[in-house]
Image (cartoon, grey):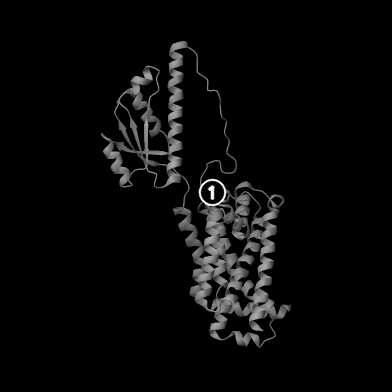
């Protein structure tokens, strides 16, 4: 490989990028737009659950239970109704997620030491949100039930009722349990994968369509120099996109960056190189820019979003799909980003993921070079 020829190829691609300011502007603005859009719109937090309450008992004890729901940040009490039909209509029209029905004999049964039922009605259209809301409601009811038993025990025996287990919970790495702290680093991996693949997926296909590939073939340039030169030109744009994502994540979304900035930069460069080589490989295979664009979208966005563990837990996937995730580079980069951002771990923990990204970049580079050599032959 000749450094002089490689530099010439690099400068040619840089000139091409600079001569198209609209595409360059889109390449730099798209990560910012995607990060802001998904960062604010995509949330896995379930709180402020819209709730209606139907209190048939209307006693001090039922009002005490209602105050437990009102005092929780997970519930947003939208009002009180006089029949079940209002709750049913609210769920049908998606105005509420949950309805609470307190029966007419609620305080009577509690006063007699018997079990009193409370009906929780949930909109199960979104099963995940409904199950989380159900867990929150059950937690409030358990706490209230224990307080009622404790008060009854104090009145009868004069002894405090001590819970059999006193949980002392400490959440590491994301103590506030904000999904944004997990989503934003994962978004960086998804965005870089998409941008990198799209930046380079049409480079060689464009050369074929414009007829300039024949001119490159007449030069002493080797396939490896063409692939690497094109990658390095777009690598500078990809690094600018990565810097934008990191700065926005820390300054706008206030995601903690506890790990090494140097390690973050190194792993980002490795991941970005593999993603850019993948785009070039697509461009070599597809001689049409339209086909290359479509292949770039399908092979970057869907695997990075669906199979990286960013949104859906890999452990819950079927075994064949779980096997496919092992060849998705975004899976390893998401793990690296979460480790660096939230846990502050280093290369001693993340070396397996980093090694895979290195191997992936080298293998895709070799395949793209051989494919291009076969095309030019």
Up the image or down, 131 lies above or below 219; here it is above
Residue 65 seen anywhere in this rendered image of the structure: yes
Picture coordinates of residue 47, whole percent (x, y)? 43, 42
Density class for disc 1 (Cα within 10 Å; few <14, some 14-19, many ≥20) is many
Report the residue at 40% width, 38% height from top. 75
- Residue in the foreground of this view, choosing between 11 and 347: 347
Picture coordinates of residue 116, whole percent (x, y)? 38, 24
Report the residue at 72% width, 77% height from top. 3
Picture coordinates of residue 140, whole percent (x, y)? 44, 31
Q: Quadrant of residue 219?
A: bottom right
- Residue in the foreground of this view, choosing between 315 and 231: 315
Up the image or down, 209 lies above or below 344; here it is below
What is the residue that sits farthest to the top in this orientation? 157
| Label 1: which secondary element | helix
Picture coordinates of residue 286, whole percent (x, y)? 56, 76
Residue 228 seen anywhere in this rendered image of the structure: no
Q: Which residue is mark 1?
A: 181
Q: Is residue 84 left or right of residue 314?
A: left
State which quarter of the image contains the C terminus: bottom right
């Amino acid at each position: 490989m000749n450094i002089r020829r490689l530099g010439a190829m690099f400068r040619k691609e840089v000139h091409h990028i600079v001569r198209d300011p609209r595409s360059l502007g889109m390449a730099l603005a798209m990560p910012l737009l995607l990060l802001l859009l998904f960062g604010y719109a995509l949330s896995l937090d379930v709180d402020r659950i819209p709730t209606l309450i139907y209190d048939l008992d209307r006693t001090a004890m039922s009002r005490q239970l209602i105050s437990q729901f009102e005092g929780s940040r997970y519930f947003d009490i939208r009002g009180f109704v006089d029949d079940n039909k209002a709750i049913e209509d609210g769920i049908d029209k998606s105005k509420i997620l949950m309805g609470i029905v307190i029966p007419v004999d609620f305080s009577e049964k509690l006063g007699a030491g018997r079990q009193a039922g409370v009906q929780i009605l949930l909109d199960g259209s979104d099963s995940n949100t409904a199950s989380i809301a159900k867990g929150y409601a059950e937690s409030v009811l358990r706490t209230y039930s224990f307080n009622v038993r404790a008060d009854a025990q104090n009145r009868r025996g004069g002894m405090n009722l001590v819970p059999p287990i006193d949980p002392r919970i400490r959440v590491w790495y994301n103590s506030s349990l904000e999904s944004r702290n997990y989503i934003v680093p994962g978004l960086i991996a998804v965005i870089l994968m998409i941008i990198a693949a799209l930046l380079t997926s049409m480079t060689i296909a464009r050369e074929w369509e414009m007829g300039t590939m024949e001119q490159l073939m007449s030069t002493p340039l080797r396939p490896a120099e063409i692939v690497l030169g094109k990658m390095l030109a777009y690598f500078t744009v990809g690094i600018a996109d990565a810097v934008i994502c990191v700065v926005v994540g820390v300054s706008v979304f206030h995601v903690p960056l506890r790990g090494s900035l140097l390690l973050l930069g190194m792993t980002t460069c490795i991941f970005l190189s593999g993603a850019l080589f993948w785009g070039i490989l697509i461009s070599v295979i597809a001689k049409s820019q339209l086909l290359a664009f479509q292949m770039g979208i399908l092979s970057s966005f869907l695997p990075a979003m669906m199979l990286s563990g960013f949104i859906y837990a890999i452990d819950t996937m079927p075994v064949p799909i779980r096997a496919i995730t092992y060849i998705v580079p975004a899976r390893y980069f998401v793990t690296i980003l979460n480790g660096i951002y939230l846990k502050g771990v280093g290369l001693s923990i993340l070396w397996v993921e980093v090694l895979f990204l290195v191997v992936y970049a080298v293998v895709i580079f070799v395949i793209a070079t051989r494919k291009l050599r076969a095309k030019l032959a």
